[in-house]
Image: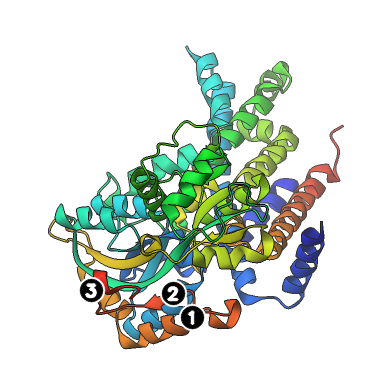
Amino acid sequence: MDVIITGIKEAIMLLIHLDPEVLSITLLSLKISGTATLISLILGVSSGTVIALTEFKGKRFVISLINTGMGLPPVVVGLFVSIMLWRNGPLGYLELLYTPFAMIIAQSIIATPIIMGISASAIQHLPKNLKLQILALGASRIQMVWLLIKEARLPLLAAIMAGFGGVISEVGASIMVGGNIKGYSRVLTTATVMETGKGNFELAIALSVILLTLSLLINAVLTYIQQRERPR
Amino acid sequence: MSKIKAITLFFIIFASFVGGADAMEKQKNIILATTTSTQDSGLLDVLIPIFEKKTGYFVKTISVGSGAAIKMGEKGEADLLLVHSPEAEKKFVESGFGINRKLVMHNDFVIVGPKEDAAKIKGEKSALAALKKIADSSSVFLTRADNSGTHTLEQKIWKKANLNPEGQKWYQQTGLGMGQTLKISSEKNGYTLSDRGTYLALKKNIALEILVEGEPILLNIYHVIEVNSAKWQKVNIDGAKSFSDFMVSKEVQDIIKTFGADKFGSPLFLPDAGKKDEEVGK
C-alpha cells in the first residue's frame, strides 16, 4: 500500500512542478490519441451511417465484422502495422515505423471499428419513420443524413468517449510501432510499462494517476456536452 | 454553441497540437536494437544525448531481448545492435548479417533466490552445481524463456550441467523482461538468473538475495555490431559506424567506468573497449 500512497504523492509533485519530461509525455499522449480519435471519428461515423442507412446483401455479416473489430486486440494491430511498415516491408519506403505517425495509424485502426459500430447501431435505433418524415418534409438526402446524425448525437458522443478511452489506455500497439523512444514516441502507457520494468513503481503509479486524471477530465468535458441538453 | 460545434472545436484544439508536432521532420535516423538491460539501467539515456549533440543523428532505441534484437538485424530492420548473447552474435556475423563486432563492456550474471534458500545454494562456487541443487530439490526456478541473452546463458548452463528442466513443474516460464521476472521470482519465492545491473536496480523492491556469483561462465559481455549494408540497402551504414565508434571511444568508456556508482555503490558495467573476448574479466 505504501507504494501507492508514495506514488500518488509523487504524481502530485510531478504535476505541481510541471516536470518537463512528464509534461511532454502527457502532451504527446494527448496529441497521438486525440488525432487518432479524430481520424476514427471521421471514418467511423461516415461509414457507420452509410451502413446503417443502406440495405444491401450481407449487411448483417458486415455489421458482425465491425462488432468483432470493436474488440480488436491492440497487440494484433501493432504486429500487423509493424510488419506493413518495416523498412523492407510493403510500406517501408514511407519510413514511418517507430514514429508518432505509426502510433496514430495503429490507434486509428483500433478506434475506427469502435466508433463505426456504435454509430451504426445509434443510427439504426432511431425511429424508423424519422427518415421518411424528414424526406417528406422536403429535405435533401444529405440534409436527412445530417439531421439523423444530429438526432443520434448522444450515443455518438459515447462512441467518441469509447474510442478515445480505448486508444489512450492502449499500450501493446503503441510500444510495438512507436518503440517507446524517449522524447519522441514515449507516451503515458509505454512509459508506465517501462518504469514498472525498471522497478520505479512510484513513478509508474504517478504516471498512471496522470493518465487516469486525464481520461477523467476529457470524459467529463464530453459528458458535460452530452448531458447539457437532455433528449426530450 | 451547438453540441456539434463544441465537439468540432474540441478536436480542432487537439489537431492544432498535432500540427505543432515536430515529428514530421526528416532526420538522419539510426535504429539501435538493444537489450532491456542497457535501457533499464539508464546508461543509454546518458550516452545517446551526447552522441546526438555531437553528430546530429537521431537515435531510435528499440529495447527488446537480445534474441529479438538480432532478429531485427537479420531482417535489416535495425542499423546496429548492442547486445549480450555472444554465441548468437558470432553466428549473426558469420552468416554475413553483421560486421565490425566490437567489445564494449561487461558485468556479470548472478543467481538470485529467496533468503530461506530451500535448495541451499548460497555460497556455491559453481553455477552448474547450484542449478543441479535447485533441480534436485525441485525448487521453483523462473526462466525468461524469451531468447534474450540471459535466457540463452541460462540454457547453456542447464545443458552443461546435463539437465533438462523443460516441462518440469518447478521450472516456470515468465516470457517477460528481466525486471518483471525478478519481481515474479520474488513473489513466488523462486530462483532466477539475472544480470547484476537489473538486480541492483530492483533490489529495494524485491525480496531476493545474490546466492551465486563470480564464476567465469557468468560473465555478461556486451558487443556492438553494425548491420551489414551489403545485405540490406536501407541500413544507415554511416550512422551505424559513427555510433559504434562512439561506444568504444575513450569518452564513453570513461562514462561507463563510473556509471551507476553514485546510485548503487558500485558501477553497473566495466568498460572493455579494445580488449579481446578472452581477456574480459581477468
Tell me the quarter of the image containing the N terminus of chain A: bottom right
Question: Can you identify the residue that label 2 sits on?
Answer: B269
Q: Secondary structure at mark 2?
A: loop
Q: For the view shown, which residue lies furthest in the top direction?
A: A57
Nearer the observer, B226 or B265:
B265
Q: Amino acid at mark 3?
A: Lys
- Determine the residue positioned at 30% across, 75% down: B243
Question: Can you identify the residue that label 1 sits on?
Answer: B259
For the residues labelled 1 and 3, the Cα–Cα distance comes to 22 Å
Q: Which of pointers 3 and 2 indicates the residue nearer the eye?
A: 3
Image location (x, y in percent) of residue B250: 32, 87
Contact between labelled residues 2 and 3, with CB atoms less than 8 Å apart: no
Of the two numbered discs 1 and 3 on the same chain, state the one appearing first in sequence: 1
Question: Can you identify the residue that label 3 sits on?
Answer: B276
Taking A141 as reference, is B150 left or right?
A: left
Of the two numbered discs 2 and 1 on the same chain, state the one appearing first in sequence: 1
Crowding near the residue tagged with mark 1, few <14, some 14–19, many ≥20 C-alpha atoms within 10 Å: many
Q: For the view shown, which residue lies furthest in the left direction?
A: B230
- Determine the residue positioned at 75% across, 67% down: A11
Contact between labelled residues 3 and 1, with CB atoms less than 8 Å apart: no
Residue A144: in sight, yes or no? no
Nearer the observer, A141 or A211:
A211
Nearer the observer, B155 or A44:
B155
Please tell me if label 1 and label 3 are on a single chain: yes
Q: Amino acid at mark 2?
A: Phe
Q: Secondary structure at mark 3?
A: loop
- Determine the residue positioned at 63% across, 51% down: B117
Callout 1: chain: B
Crowding near the residue tagged with mark 3, few <14, some 14–19, many ≥20 C-alpha atoms within 10 Å: few
Q: Amino acid at mark 1?
A: Phe
Of the two numbered discs 3 and 2 on the same chain, state the one appearing first in sequence: 2
